[in-house]
Image: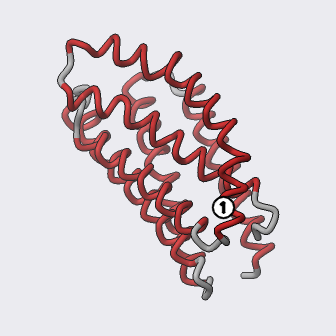
């Protein structure tokens, strides 16, 4: 299958999966079945993504193939987090503990994404990286300030009765998301990015 046909197939599968998920949520009147379907749809999406990302890793023969491998690792990690969540949600019928195993897998997902972007960026020249840092520092500082004021600080204020580990997990998700945003900004600001 060629690259164009592969992209068309990916778009088709994404649309069908999203449409089926929306129909399931809207049409299902039984709360228990809605939970089961929701968990299954949220677990199958990263499985499909991990498969496609790993296939891309196998197809690419350049140094950038490691980027695709770490992205596939991130989707596997997200899938494992969802499997743990489903075990608590469907089998045990309880809310998963926080912090729990699923949170560790979800943080690992963000770490894998950050490593993938970092690897992609290390292929750039030093002067290009400095220019990109300067260009994106303004955006990141604004995003960090907004995230701190409206996301991290309120979470930490609410979680004062929780352990230090819980607070670290609360804050790490936002911090890792900002790191991923930084990587994306570097990539999109790069004029020579393929």
Report the residue at 43% width, 58% height from top. 112
Query: Which quadrant would the N terminus be assigned to in this image?
Result: bottom right
Is residue 169 visible in the rendered structure shown here? yes
Q: Is residue 135 above or below residue 71?
A: above
Q: Residues within 10 Å of mark 1 (few under 14, many from 20)?
A: some
Q: Is residue 154 above or below residue 30?
A: above
Quick one: which residue is furthest to the bottom in this view?
61
Q: How is the image coloured?
A: secondary structure
Locate residue 92, reporting x and y percent: 19, 34
Foreground: 126 or 161? 126
Report the residue at 41% width, 36% height from top. 173
Report the residue at 60% width, 65% height from top. 121
> For the residue labelled by badge 1, is the local secondary structure a helix, a strand or a loop?
helix
Q: How many marks?
A: 1
Foreground: 161 or 19? 161
Is residue 52 visible in the rendered structure shown here? no
Locate residue 46, reporting x and y percent: 49, 54
Q: Quadrant of residue 13?
A: bottom right
> Which residue is denoted by mark 1 in the rendering?
129
Foreground: 17 or 152? 152
Indicate left or right for 39 with 182 as reference. left
Locate residue 101, reporting x and y percent: 23, 43
Query: Which quadrant would the C terminus be assigned to in this image?
Result: bottom right
Locate residue 77, reporting x and y percent: 37, 55
Report the residue at 65% width, 41% height from top. 137
Indicate left or right for 168 with 113 as reference. left
Q: Is residue 165 above or below residue 31?
A: below
Q: Quadrant of residue 160?
A: top left
């Amino acid at each position: 299958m060629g690259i164009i046909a592969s992209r068309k197939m990916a778009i088709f599968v994404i649309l069908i999966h999203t449409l089926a998920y929306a129909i399931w949520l809207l049409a299902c009147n039984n709360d228990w079945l809605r939970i089961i379907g929701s968990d299954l749809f949220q677990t199958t999406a990263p499985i499909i993504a991990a498969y496609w990302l790993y296939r891309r890793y196998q197809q690419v023969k350049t140094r950038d193939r490691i980027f695709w491998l770490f992205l596939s690792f991130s989707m596997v990690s997200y899938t494992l987090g969802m499997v743990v969540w489903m075990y608590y949600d469907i089998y045990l019928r309880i809310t998963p503990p926080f912090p729990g195993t699923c949170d560790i897998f979800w943080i690992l997902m963000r770490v894998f994404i950050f490593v993938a972007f970092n690897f992609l960026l290390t292929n750039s020249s030093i002067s290009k990286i400095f220019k990109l840092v300067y260009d994106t520092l303004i955006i990141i500082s604004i995003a960090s300030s907004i995230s701190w004021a409206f996301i991290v600080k309120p979470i930490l204020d609410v979680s004062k009765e929780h352990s230090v580990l819980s607070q670290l997990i609360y804050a790490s998700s936002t911090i890792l998301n900002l790191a991923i945003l930084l990587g994306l900004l570097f990539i999109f600001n790069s004029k020579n990015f393929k």
